[in-house]
Image (cartoon, helix red, strand yellow):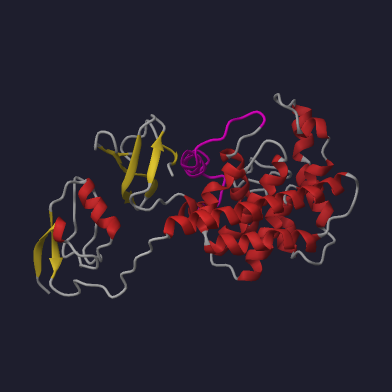
Amino acid sequence: MGYILENLEELKLGSVIAEDILVNTKTPIIRKGTKVTREHIQVLKAFNILKVSIAFENTKTNNEKTDLSKKEVIQGTETNFINLYIDAVNNYQKEFSSWEAGMNVDVAKLRMIIMPLVERVSKEKQVILKLNGYSAIEKYVSHHSIAVGIISGMLAQKLGYPIGQVIQSATAGLMADSGMAKVNTKIRNKKSLLTEDEYSEIKKHTIHSFQMIKDSSLLKPEMKLAIFQHHERLDGSGYPKGEKMGKISIFSQIIAVADVFHAMTSERIYRAKGSIFKVLEMIKEEEFGKYNIEVVNALISLVGVLPISTRVLLSNGEVGEVVFLHRDSPMRPMIRILESNQIIDLSANRSFNIERIVQ
């Protein structure tokens, strides 16, 4: 198969790149054999590449489609999801209040609360990026529980578990903090730093959660264990028993990663919410050895990989768009600054990071 040099202005969608395209990068920004999309053309323009090598064959695709109403569809979809999410938070809050009053946990009802959300997000995974934005300090436990349920289900799905275990994981994630209903309200809602004794009371919530669901026939034993262990860490630094490595189940780690990710990216009484991308880096790098790396990588693939041309706000206040993703470090792509057209490689410049996506 031969190739020709094609001017960028004349480049057709579906054309096949004949040679790796390198621009002072260790890996190609576009690889040989890639079929050209609109995103690739945007990347080439961002790097000021005027001509590319195109293979003689397969210069046209039959699958090219246009979607003039994509933006409207996405906006409508998000509105529908928010309504579904708010209903779920309110329904969970009612259950939580009943547990505070001494009522038993209704696992079937909780499963019905989380299932529609899991089904929706499994088709629209971009919603996960916005869960921390829906959260609120008021009813934080309810917001957090719904989000952890959703993320746990999506992590199980990403890791290849069958639908039954996906639903079980989502339900267990939803119920992981149910034991908070047994923690003194003054301690749970305290706005200042907790004392050592108060923190010890908070840590008992995993035991309370397990006690509340241990007799249910609707949760598998491994999911009950996951609820009990979701604050254990592989290096032994967690609670309630300080278990290590092989004694901590994979489902415990799924809920653990979902829990810490949503907690660190959400506004709390005593802490502002952190950047999703900075938090992902912290979980993977600074907290290395505490979490199952396979689960962490599944989370990164769900929320840390941004499509080319996504507009983002950097922590230095500048706005840019993603022009290239590093395979080993997707949270630190190459960014073209909109105001100056300067290309910044976040993998090489670690003094700042992506703060958030700009709509």
* Image height of 206 relative to 70, above or below: above
Image coordinates of residue 92 in percent, x first then y, are: 76, 51
Residue 137: quadrant of the picture: top right
| Range covered by the magenta-colored residues | 269-293
- The quarter in which the N terminus is drawn is bottom left
- Look at the image and say whether residue 276 sits in the magenta stretch: yes
Relative to 38, is 252 on the left or the right? Answer: right
All told, the count of numbered labels is: 0
* Image height of 151 relative to 345, above or below: below
Visible residue check, residue 201: yes
* Image height of 160 relative to 137, above or below: below
Relative to 226, is 73 on the left or the right? Answer: left
- Look at the image and say whether residue 317 sits in the magenta stretch: no
Residue 106: quadrant of the picture: bottom right
Relative to 205, is 275 on the left or the right? Answer: left
- The quarter in which the C terminus is drawn is top left
Q: Residue at 75% of width from left, 39% of height from top? A: 203
Image coordinates of residue 197 in percent, x first then y, are: 79, 29
Relative to 59, is 338 on the left or the right? Answer: right
Image coordinates of residue 40 in percent, x first then y, are: 26, 57
Q: Residue at 90% of width from left, 51% of height from top? A: 103
Image coordinates of residue 70 in percent, x first then y, are: 42, 59
Visible residue check, residue 148: no
Using the image as rendered, state which of residue 117 and residue 201 is in the foreground: 117
Q: Residue at 28% of width from left, 58% of height from top? A: 38
